[in-house]
Image (cartoon, rainbow, N blue to C red):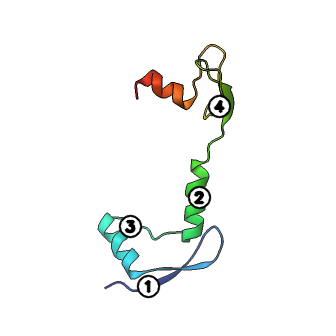
Amino acid sequence: MYTDKTLVCKDCGNEFVFTAGEQEFYAEKGFTNEPQRCKQCRDAKKNASRNREMFPATCASCGKECQVPFKPRDDRPVYCSECFAKQKGV
């Protein structure tokens, strides 16, 4: 029913194969569009969205230097991951 297709990645311009198995998976999931990026570019795009800017902070509880994924404000306490877990009772 499905046959392998050669597609061109919209990011890098390289050809990649959209296999019959992948096409069947897409159909089972109800996806109507073919992939536009090769696996390497899909992975790179996924990882880029996960890389958040981190900001330096000092824990309000233990005083340890830490990194947080938001810009600390002077009017709110910031906790390192260990103290934050203690605050939440985890």
Nearer the camera: disc 3 or disc 1: 1
- Asked if the residue under mark 3 is in contact with the one under mark 4, i.e. CB atoms within 8 Å, the reply is no
**Residue on which the image places disc 3:** 32
Q: Residues within 10 Å of mark 1 (few under 14, many from 20)?
A: few
Q: Position of residue 77 (x, y in %)?
A: 59, 17
State the quadrant of the N terminus: bottom left
Q: Position of residue 31 (x, y in %)?
A: 37, 65
State the quadrant of the C terminus: top left
User: Rounded to the nearest whole Å, what is the CA distance between mark 2 and mark 4?
Assistant: 27 Å
Q: Position of residue 27 (x, y in %)?
A: 33, 70
User: Rounded to the nearest whole Å, what is the CA distance between mark 3 and mark 2?
Assistant: 21 Å
Q: Secondary structure at mark 3?
A: loop
Nearer the camera: disc 3 or disc 2: 2
Q: Position of residue 42 (x, y in %)?
A: 55, 64
**Residue on which the image places disc 1:** 4
Q: Is residue 3 above or below residue 88?
A: below
Q: Amino acid at mark 1?
A: Asp
User: Rounded to the nearest whole Å, what is the CA distance between mark 3 and mark 1?
Assistant: 16 Å
Q: Quadrant of residue 41?
A: bottom right
Say which label, 3 or 2, has the lower sequence index: 3
Observer-nearest of 59 and 10: 59
**Residue on which the image places disc 4:** 66
Q: Is residue 9 left or right of residue 31?
A: right
